[in-house]
C-alpha cells in the first residue's frame, strides 16, 4: 500500500507534461517567400503589439486564447494579414499515459498555452501596389 501511494505521488508530479517541457517562449521567423525585405509589418502576439520589418524574428509565448498575427502595413504593398500556425506539441499526448490525471493535466496545458508548438517559419505574402514612388 505504501509503495502504491509513493508511486501515485511520483506520477502526480508529471501532471501537465506540456507545461513542464514546453513552458516559456518560442521563436519564429516571419519572411517573404520571394526574399523581399524591409516591408513594414505590425506584429500582434498574446503579450502585445509592435512594428517591425520583414524578415523579423518573433519571440512569443503560445496561447490558447490569442493568435500571433502579422499585418502588412507598408505604403507600397497591399494590406494583408497572416495568422501564425500552431499545432499540438507531442508532450501534450503524454498526459494520456497518466489517464487518471489526463483531464487535469489537459486543462493546465490548455490554460497555460503550453500544449501548442508554434510554426518556426511564417510566410508573409506581399503584393506590390501600383503607387507612384514605390
Image (tube, grey):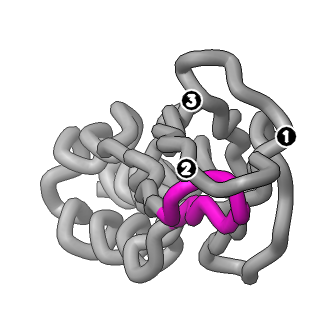
Instruction: Indicate which disc, 3 or 1, sits on the residue closer to the N terminus.
Output: 1
Q: Tell me how far mark 1 sits from mark 2, CA to CA.
A: 18 Å
Residue 131, label in figure: none
Which portion, as a residue range, is magenta? 68-79
For residue 33, above or below residue 88? above
Asked where in the image residue 83 lies, by quadrant, the reply is: bottom left
Left-right relation of 87 to 81 = left
Which residue has dot 3 on it? Answer: 121
For residue 102, above or below residue 77? below
Which residue has dot 1 on it? Answer: 38
Residue 130, label in figure: 2
Residue nearest the viewer, comparing 132 with 44: 132
Residue nearest the viewer, comparing 78 with 99: 78
Q: Tell me how far mark 3 sits from mark 1, CA to CA.
A: 17 Å
Instruction: Indicate which disc, 3 or 2, sits on the residue closer to the N terminus.
Output: 3
Q: Nearer the viewer, mark 1 or mark 2?
A: 2
> Which residue sits at x=60%, y=29%?
32
Whether residue 6 can be seen here: no
Amino acid at each position: 500500500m505504501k509503495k502504491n501511494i509513493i508511486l501515485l505521488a511520483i506520477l502526480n508530479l508529471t501532471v501537465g507534461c506540456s507545461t513542464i517541457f514546453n513552458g516559456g517562449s518560442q521563436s519564429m521567423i516571419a519572411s517573404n517567400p520571394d526574399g523581399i525585405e524591409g516591408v513594414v509589418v505590425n506584429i500582434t502576439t498574446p503579450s502585445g503589439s509592435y512594428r517591425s520589418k520583414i524578415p523579423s524574428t518573433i519571440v512569443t509565448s503560445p496561447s490558447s486564447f490569442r493568435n500571433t498575427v502579422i499585418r502588412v502595413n507598408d505604403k507600397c504593398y497591399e494590406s494583408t494579414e497572416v495568422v501564425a500556425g500552431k499545432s499540438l506539441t507531442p508532450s501534450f499526448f503524454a498526459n494520456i499515459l497518466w489517464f487518471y490525471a489526463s483531464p487535469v493535466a489537459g486543462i493546465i496545458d490548455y490554460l497555460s498555452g503550453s500544449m501548442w508548438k508554434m510554426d518556426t517559419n511564417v510566410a508573409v505574402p506581399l503584393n506590390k501596389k501600383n503607387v507612384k514612388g514605390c
